[in-house]
Image: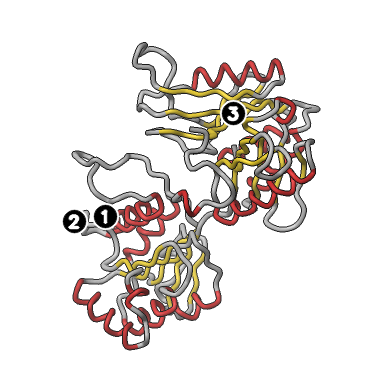
């Protein structure tokens, strides 16, 4: 739902009533991940998508029905071998979809309105909703902020709200959307509830060091992928708004000095295109010790070997060096700045989503990967969602 927060926020401000269908869990090969949403207002206007087209018509009808009767509903869609024309996913996957009406006077409306407003402003927030459990708990929501109190509640046991808020903050810290299972009273005891937690976090950062032509192409593709992109270079003649009009930020500063003072997290990607040891070595010495998602450095294989020796001389360990993606990018045979940017972006996406980088033709790897290993996920949840 929060993936279409800007549009839904406008609907709320306009006083529209609507129903929102949210992907709760997926099994097998499915085109959209948990959190993907489709919404339909009282006039039949539709925004968003839950399947890329396979089941949109049926979900549209479910939203219309939910608006009429005011009841939340959980529906499963999958492929039917017996009837090729049955509503389902032709890719062979299975998805569970939660449909929630958001009407004037509903208890859920002010909570969702606050969540949508925060997400539309680019603020970090998470919203938790009961997916399966007692009917009286469905249609309630809890809004969780990174710090401070939570808003709303499930109207059951106070400990349930507190525990869900605590677990949801772990999801929010990781920028994850998914489900957790918890007892009705907020513990492992009692009938289990399945709770959908949707996280909305500011865009991940891409920091490009080196204001060269290849950086210009990488900035464009970084923005296309949804990153907040910074270009940093110590040379003011190259690090200019004219050269990088699409960058969110341009910094004229020694790269390692800027990296020391700026904020990074586990989603940040660092692309070192400086091609100069006096910039690369102090920068990579710091970068390889930071908890970021990706560190890549441009250069030939000879440059790579020379740079590694220089890094060893300043105390970088073999374990730290193993984090460095160099020469940067996947082997696409790239030559132009745009092709090179594509190869770098492909490597970043593969690392983020757990892909192998090999051609899908003839491969026996899954098309869609679960990018977060089950053992690393926060909270109490089933590894396969609802399946």
Question: Residue drawn at (27%, 51%), measured in percent from left and top?
Answer: 357
Q: Residue at x 68, y 32 (%)?
A: 11
Instruction: Residue 339: give its label.
Output: 1
**CA distance for labels 3 and 1:** 41 Å
Report the side of 76 relative to 183 (left or right).
Answer: left
Tell me the distance, in whole angstroms, between the alpha carbons under discs 2 and 3.
Answer: 44 Å
Q: Secondary structure at mark 2?
A: loop
Q: Position of residue 377 (x, y in %)?
A: 52, 51
Do the residues bearing badges 2 and 1 touch, measured as CB atoms within 8 Å? yes
- Nearer to me, 159 or 343: 159
Q: CA distance from mark 2 to mark 1?
A: 8 Å
Helix, strand or loop at label 1? It is helix
| Colour scheme of the picture | secondary structure
Q: Nearer the viewer, residue 40 or 379?
A: 379
Label located before the other in sequence (2 or 1): 2
| Residue to which mark 3 is pinned | 98
User: Pointers 2 and 3 in contact (CB under 8 A)?
Assistant: no
Of circles 2 and 1, the one toward us is: 2
Mark positioned earlier in the residue sequence (2 or 3): 3
Q: Quadrant of the N terminus?
A: top right
Q: Residue at x 37, y 86 (%)?
A: 315
Q: Which residue is tagged 2?
A: 333
* Residue 115, quarter of the rendered image: top right
Q: Residue at x 42, y 45 (%)?
A: 370
Question: Is residue 342 toward the left or the right of residue 246 in the image?
Answer: left
**Dot 3: element:** strand
- Crowdedness of circle 1 by 10 Å Cα count: few (<14), some, many (20+)? some
Mark 3, residues whose alpha carbon is within 10 Å: few (<14), some, or many (≥20)? many
> Which of these two is toward me, 58 or 154?
154
């Amino acid at each position: 739902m929060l993936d279409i927060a800007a549009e839904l926020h406008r609907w709320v401000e306009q006083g529209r009533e609507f129903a929102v269908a949210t992907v709760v869990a997926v099994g097998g090969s499915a085109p959209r991940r948990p959190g993907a949403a489709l919404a339909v207002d009282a006039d039949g206007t539709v925004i968003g998508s839950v399947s890329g087209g396979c089941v949109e018509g049926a979900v549209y009808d479910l939203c219309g029905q939910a608006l009429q009767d005011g009841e939340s509903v959980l529906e499963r869609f999958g492929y039917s071998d017996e009837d090729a024309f049955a509503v389902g996913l032709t890719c062979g996957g299975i998805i569970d979809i939660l449909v929630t009406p958001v009407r004037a006077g509903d208890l859920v409306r002010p909570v969702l309105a606050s969540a949508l407003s925060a997400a539309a402003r680019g603020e970090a927030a998470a919203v938790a909703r009961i997916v399966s459990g007692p009917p009286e708990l469905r249609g309630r929501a809890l809004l969780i902020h990174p710090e401070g109190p939570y808003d709303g509640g499930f109207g059951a046991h106070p400990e349930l709200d507190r525990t869900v808020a605590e677990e949801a903050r772990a999801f929010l810290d990781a920028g994850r959307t998914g489900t957790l299972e918890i007892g009705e009273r907020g513990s492992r005891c009692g009938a289990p509830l399945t709770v959908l937690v949707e996280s909305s976090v500011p865009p991940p950062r891409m920091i490009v060091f080196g204001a060269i032509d290849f950086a210009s192409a990488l900035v464009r593709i970084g923005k296309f992928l949804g990153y907040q992109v910074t270009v940093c270079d110590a040379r003011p003649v190259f690090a200019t708004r004219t050269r990088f009009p699409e960058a969110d930020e341009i910094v004229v500063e020694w790269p390692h000095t800027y990296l020391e003072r700026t904020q990074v997290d586990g989603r940040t990607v660092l692309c070192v295109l400086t091609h100069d040891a006096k910039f690369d070595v102090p920068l990579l010495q710091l970068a390889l010790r930071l908890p970021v998602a990706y560190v890549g450095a441009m250069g030939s294989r000879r440059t790579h070997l020379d740079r590694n020796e220089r890094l060893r001389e300043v105390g970088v360990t073999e374990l730290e060096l193993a984090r460095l993606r160099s020469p940067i990018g996947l082997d696409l045979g790239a030559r132009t700045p745009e092709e090179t940017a594509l190869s770098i972006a492909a490597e970043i996406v593969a690392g983020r989503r757990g892909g192998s980088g090999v051609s899908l033709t003839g491969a026996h790897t899954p098309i869609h990967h679960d990018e977060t290993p089950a053992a690393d996920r926060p909270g109490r949840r089933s590894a396969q969602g609802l399946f």
